[in-house]
Amino acid sequence: MNEIPYQLMRADIYGVLRRELLSCAIRPGAEIRDAEIAERFAVSRSPVRDALLRLEAEGLVVISPRKGYRAAPISIADARDLFEFRAILEPACAASVASEATDEALRGLDRFCSMDGFAAGAAAAEPTFVQYNREFHLAIAGLCTNQRMREAAIDLIEQFDRLVIVSISSSEAGGQQEALIAEHCEIITALQARDGKRAGRILARHAGRARKRVLSALSRSPIVP
């Protein structure tokens, strides 16, 4: 009788903590006290620890003997790995989308040719551009018909939030956003023309520029080991 409520409770705690870690509401390297989280959700420590174990498996939490739980620090080596994976996965998704998405779905991407309609995320105090950029890449991934690629791409894009939020201030993003939006429009045009190869090339170039920008910023960040 109590199994279903417990499972729902555990999933809710996991979901909330995951969002807070990815948005940097829980800062990289910060201590996470299971007792405080249990009090916050009015639960025992057991479902909290289950959620933290899942987050450890995703690389978002570090568990140390006698030291407890911490939000995983942002590692430059891990950032490089994420960019390498992205350079392979996103062009593959683009090829799938270009060949198999409906015309209506592809026309729906036109909304990303401007940031109109996007507002800053109040809960995480994230810049408008961060939300816009994430939603653009998630929209393309969501149109991929290969379920495994789609799920991997969505997880990868969500993992990038920590890199973007920590490494790019809203003022820096503001200076670059016009060029980045123009690149997004190029990608959309290629997808709507059913030219998956061209969309993939633009995405690879787009990711390469992001890699250079993010790694440079992370190398100066005090929270990167």
Image (tube, rainbow, N blue to C red):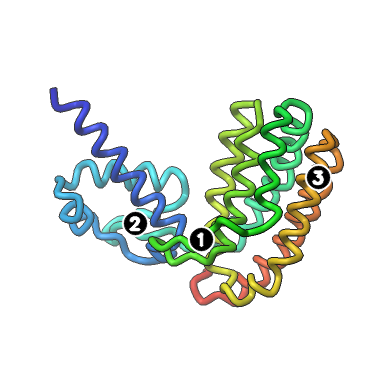
Please identify, in this view, whether the residue under mark 3 or under mark 2 is nearer the observer. Answer: 3
Closer to the chain start, of discs 2 and 1, is: 2
128 vs 31, nearest the viewer: 128
Q: Disc 1 and disc 3: Cα gap in Å?
A: 24 Å
Q: Is residue 35 above or below residue 95?
A: below
Check disc 2 and report its element: helix, strand or loop: strand
113 vs 70, nearest the viewer: 113
In the rendering, at what x and y percent does residue 5 appear?
Answer: 19, 31
Extreme residue in the top direction: 1
Q: Disc 2 and disc 1: Cα gap in Å?
A: 38 Å
Left or right of 136? Residue 95 is right
What's the residue type where badge 3 is placed? Thr
What's the residue type where badge 1 is placed? Ala
Residue that numbered label 1 is attached to = 119
What's the residue type where badge 2 is placed? Ser
In the rendering, at what x and y percent does residue 145 appear?
Answer: 65, 26
In the rendering, at what x and y percent does residue 29 appear?
Answer: 41, 66
Please identify, in this view, whether the residue under mark 2 or under mark 1 is nearer the observer. Answer: 1
Residue that numbered label 3 is attached to = 189
Check disc 3 and report its element: helix, strand or loop: helix
x 59%, y 70%: residue: 168
21 vs 179, nearest the viewer: 179
x 19%, y 26%: residue: 3
Residue that numbered label 2 is attached to = 64
Check disc 1 and report its element: helix, strand or loop: loop
x 36%, y 44%: residue: 15
In the rendering, at what x and y percent does residue 159 appear?
Answer: 53, 51
Closer to the chain start, of discs 3 and 2, is: 2
Q: Is residue 17 above or below residue 105?
A: below
x 76%, y 62%: residue: 209
